[in-house]
Amino acid sequence: MEKNKLLIISEDSKICANNLGDLITVIISTKNRWQDLQRALVSLRNQTLAHKVIVIDDNSDDGTSDNVKSLFPEVVLYTHTESKGYIVRRNEAVRHAQTPYVLSIDDDCVLGNDTTIYELAVFCFQTKSAAIAWPHIDVRSSDEVNNYAPAKELWQSCTFKGCSFIVDKKIFIDSGGFRSTFVHQGEEEDFCIRLLNRGFPVLLGSGNPIYHYESPRRNWSRMDYYGSRNLILFAFFNVPLLFLPVQLVLSATKSILYGFKIKRPYQKFLGVVHGFRDGFRLMRTERSPVSLKTFLRYRELKKGHQLIKRF
């Protein structure tokens, strides 16, 4: 497919794609994973639809910024000498974007099909959605396509995954973006329940998936700790008082039991303890519970994606 061709959406409708590239900026936050990032940027360069790319280098010391400058001059690069983590950097990247929509991918993702950006731009154009969970495959663990909606159907999800999501820039900023207090892990669901409380559903995308090659350099101790801590903070910040005690007990129990299951209980337990400590400390400034109606809807969506509309 050549750039900026007409895409047939259905038998009786067409969308002119001449300006679709102006809809999308792809953002990537990275640190010390140049080889992964290089594969991601090559796959973006090979897309049929021209688009903008922003890379935020969160204080790498492996030559990432120099390599991006020399090998990918089309990329807008922001380099930092202080590391603040991908949550802060994703918020920053969204603010830097000059397009209505932002696609965020991890630096260890690859767009395996050269029309993926084209397809998601058309999906944004059609649905005008505030947030989209784009299909992805966690390649190292399964060949299952996650968050995929069949063509001619709109499905709603409770959240998206950080490796492949799209947001409306204005709505994202107006909703407060991701909470920096989460530091690492769990920011997506916290943002999406707040988005739902404003009346904006998260839709499942329909198109070629993004391939997520989870980096072997992941820090599992850090992930275990913040995963548990932030599950507790999610409850403190968002859950209505009527359900809060039960939600805290369930979240703590689930985290600790899972820690034993994966044979890494210490960091999971520590995360729970610090979640309660930080939750009580931050309640005054961070707690803004969603409505009871929103919370009940969120619980329904946690059980499974729900069909909104068939065309």
Image (cartoon, grey):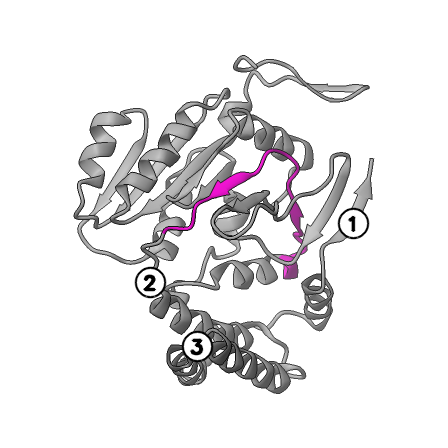
Judging by the rendered image, the residue that carries numbered circle 3 is 263
Alpha-carbon neighbours of circle 2 within 10 Å: few (<14), some, or many (≥20)?
A: few
Image point (35%, 46%), residue name: 29
**Which amino acid, by three-letter code, is at mark 2?**
Asn
Task: Give the image quarter of residue 129.
Answer: top right
Image point (45%, 34%), residue name: 25
Residue 171 is left or right of residue 299, and the answer is left
Q: Quadrant of the C terminus?
A: top right
Task: State the residue in front, 96 or 302.
Answer: 302
Quick check: is 58 in the magenta stretch? no
What element does badge 2 sit on?
Answer: loop
Chain part drawn in magenta:
196-215
Which of the two discs, 3 and 2, labels the residue nearer the N terminus?
A: 2
What element does badge 3 sit on?
Answer: loop
**Which amino acid, by three-letter code, is at mark 3?**
Lys
Depicted 231 relative to depicted 48: above or below: below
- Asked if the residue at tag 1 contacts the one at tag 2, i.e. Cβ–Cβ closer than 8 Å, the answer is no
Distance CA(mark 3)–CA(mark 2): 15 Å
Judging by the rendered image, the residue that carries numbered circle 1 is 307
**Which amino acid, by three-letter code, is at mark 1?**
Leu
Task: Please name the predominant secondary structure of the magenta segment in the image.
Answer: loop
Residue 119: percent from the left, percent from the top? 60, 29
Q: Quadrant of the N terminus?
A: top right
Residue 101: percent from the left, percent from the top? 52, 37
Which of the two discs, 2 and 1, labels the residue nearer the N terminus?
A: 2
Task: Give the image quarter of residue 82.
Answer: bottom left
Distance CA(mark 2)–CA(mark 1): 36 Å
Residue 41: percent from the left, percent from the top? 36, 32
Depicted 41 relative to depicted 267: above or below: above
Judging by the rendered image, the residue that carries numbered circle 2 is 219
Of circles 3 and 1, the one toward us is 3
Looking at the rendered structure, which numbered label has been put on residue 131? none
